[in-house]
Image: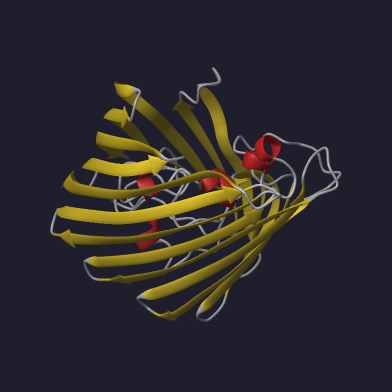
Amino acid sequence: MKLAQTLKPAAAVGFIALSLTGTAHADDKFKLTDSLSVTGFIDMSWSSVDVEGVGTEQSSGLDQFEIDFLYSFDSKFSAQVDLEYQDNGTGEEVDIEQAFISYAVSENFSVKAGRFLSYTGWETEEPTGLYQYSGTGYAAYFYGGYQQGVSGFYKGNGYQVALSLVNDLGDLEGENRDTDHPAFEAMLAVTPTEATIAKAFYSSDKLDGTDETITLVNLWAAYIEGSLTLAVEYNTSENAPAYAYRYGIDSEASGYLIMGNYAMNDFAITLRYHDYAIDDASGAEVEDGSAITIAPSYTFTKNLWVVFEYRMGEQNGVDVDLMALEALVTF
């Protein structure tokens, strides 16, 4: 997971000053022993979705509970296990989200091995790393998902690089153990100033059951200064598993987002626009989606964040509007 510090999204607190593992955690995690600490969150919401020609559907309840165990054997060697409850529609409501070990070879270079989340994407997998209630919905087409393998991370003066060798790309559950055709994910990040950062990712894999190659490209840049956060992201992909098995070999996708967030003491407001499209091998557009999102939020305490969202979008030519109220508690 990419957990925020005191409810500020990980994009704002972790990407400018990356740790050797490339992950930001909450400041207020509590210790069970000198070596073992725990952090996590509780996420609940109410939402109303209005689909043109279909009607309105409302839902409410617990979205996700997560607890993460972080164990430090010494100053160099550590382990992390993330357990979560989330109704993902498959009946697997409780699972091990991440489980990996990390070793700091030096102050600048570290390696980790196990099951871990891809570095890719401006928007994080967890609600603790979002500035609004909803994600764009296109992550499965462009981001790496959960992975099993090994990753190296190097932090230099004004830049970071990472290379991961993993079993599979686009495996949202991270359960693939087949190593016959390993995938890779490469990252280059630069921080030209204290307020700006840009990241570029290139990932490649073999599409299971075919001789075709999966290609994922994710580029994003952010400006974070005082109360203002601005970000832009651009993505392209070919034969991503999330759509290649539906639309055929040589299908391609592209997408982007633009967002801004401004905070005034405990109040903040986010405005985001995103758009994506998928084309089949003939070049015909087979899926598209876009939306404008506005999300005012209020931080009641450093552990309680509440956000309201209104999202006005279009999916394959059909208007889809969302209203949501979310309460997020971190510990």
Q: Nearer the viewer, residue 61 or 318?
A: 318
Name the outermost residue toward the top. Answer: 91
Q: Is residue 32 visible?
A: yes
For image coordinates 79% across by 40% down, the residue present is 208
Q: Is residue 79 visible?
A: no
For image coordinates 61% across by 34% down, the residue present is 173
Numbered label tally: 0
Place of residue 181 in the rendered image (x, y in percent of width and height, measured from the top left): 83, 47
Place of residue 203 in the rendered image (x, y in percent of width and height, measured from the top left): 68, 58
Q: Nearer the viewer, residue 234 or 78?
A: 234
Residue 197 as seen in the image, left or right of residue 241: left
Q: Based on the displayed image, in which of its 4 quarters is residue 57 positioned?
A: top left
Q: Nearer the viewer, residue 38 or 306?
A: 306
Residue 107 as seen in the image, left or right of residue 137: right
Q: In the image, is residue 48 above or below residue 255?
A: above
Task: Give the colour scheme shown.
Answer: secondary structure
Place of residue 91 in the rendered image (x, y in percent of width and height, measured from the top left): 54, 17
Place of residue 105 in the rendered image (x, y in percent of width and height, measured from the top left): 66, 65
Residue 290 as seen in the image, left or right of residue 203: left
Q: In the image, is residue 252 above or below residue 51?
A: below
Q: Quadrant where the C terminus lies?
A: top left
